[in-house]
Image (cartoon, rainbow, N blue to C red):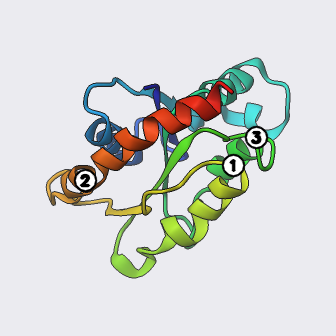
């Protein structure tokens, strides 16, 4: 199973990247995820046709499991992540991809943001979003056990859906 982490934090090597990688490894511990830290693309995300961005889009669209992660900015995911998601064709760009929306924030007030704001755009792009979104405290996610509990609960679902994603991706 190919696993990718897409991070929409405007800070390089962020806590969002750490959290998303932990989620990916928790759901598929036998796989080493490919990491796409969108901040590395800079202004290349503002248009279409940049070869590095196109390669990242191919990597994501050919993955079976993708963790899409963002900090909570202005009660939603970042514009950086939105710019990247705009690179995918509507309805089919993420077909065959099991997408997991993950967001981090300072407190529980935005706990529904992954499901209410990020998941719908992933679905619009064709992703399968069978798992609930995950909201994490940006200060405590490394020690509060939330990622471990989430991973333990949903790992078997990811495994069961892996064959389905592969068939859809290569059909």
Label 1 crowding class (10 Å Cα cut-off): few <14, some 14-19, many 20+? Answer: many
The numbered mark at residue 51 is none
Q: Are marks 1 and 3 in contact (CB under 8 Å)?
A: yes
Q: Are discs 1 and 2 less than 8 Å apart at CB?
A: no
Quadrant of residue 77 in the image? Answer: bottom right
Question: Which residue in the protein does label 1 denote?
Answer: 126
- Residue 5 visible, this orientation: no
For marks 1 and 2, give the CA distance: 25 Å
- Residue 147 image label: 2
Choose the circle earlier in sequence order: 1 or 3.
3
Front residue (pair 8, 94): 94
Q: Quadrant of the N terminus?
A: top left
Q: Nearer the viewer, residue 160 or 99?
A: 160
Q: Position of residue 65 (x, y in %)?
A: 47, 37
Is residue 47 shown left or right of residue 151? right
Give the residue pinned by disc 3: 88
Which circle, 1 or 3, is nearer the viewer? 1
Q: Secondary structure at mark 3?
A: loop
């Amino acid at each position: 199973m190919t696993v990718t982490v897409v991070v929409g934090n405007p800070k390089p090597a962020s806590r969002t990247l750490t959290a998303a990688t932990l989620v990916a490894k928790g759901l598929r511990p036998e796989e080493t995820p490919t990491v796409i830290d969108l901040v590395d693309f800079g202004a290349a995300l503002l248009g279409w046709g940049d070869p590095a961005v196109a390669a990242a889009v191919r990597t994501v669209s050919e993955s079976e499991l993708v963790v899409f992660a963002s900090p909570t900015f202005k009660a939603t995911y970042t514009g950086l992540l939105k710019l990247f998601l705009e690179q995918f064709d509507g309805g089919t760009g993420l077909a065959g991809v099991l997408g997991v929306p993950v967001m981090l924030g300072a407190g529980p007030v935005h706990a529904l943001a992954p499901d209410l704001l990020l998941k719908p755009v992933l679905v619009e792009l064709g992703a399968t979003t069978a798992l609930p979104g995950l909201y994490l405290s940006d200060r405590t996610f490394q020690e509060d056990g939330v990622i471990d509990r989430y991973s333990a609960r949903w790992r078997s679902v990811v495994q069961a859906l892996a064959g389905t994603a592969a068939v859809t991706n290569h059909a």
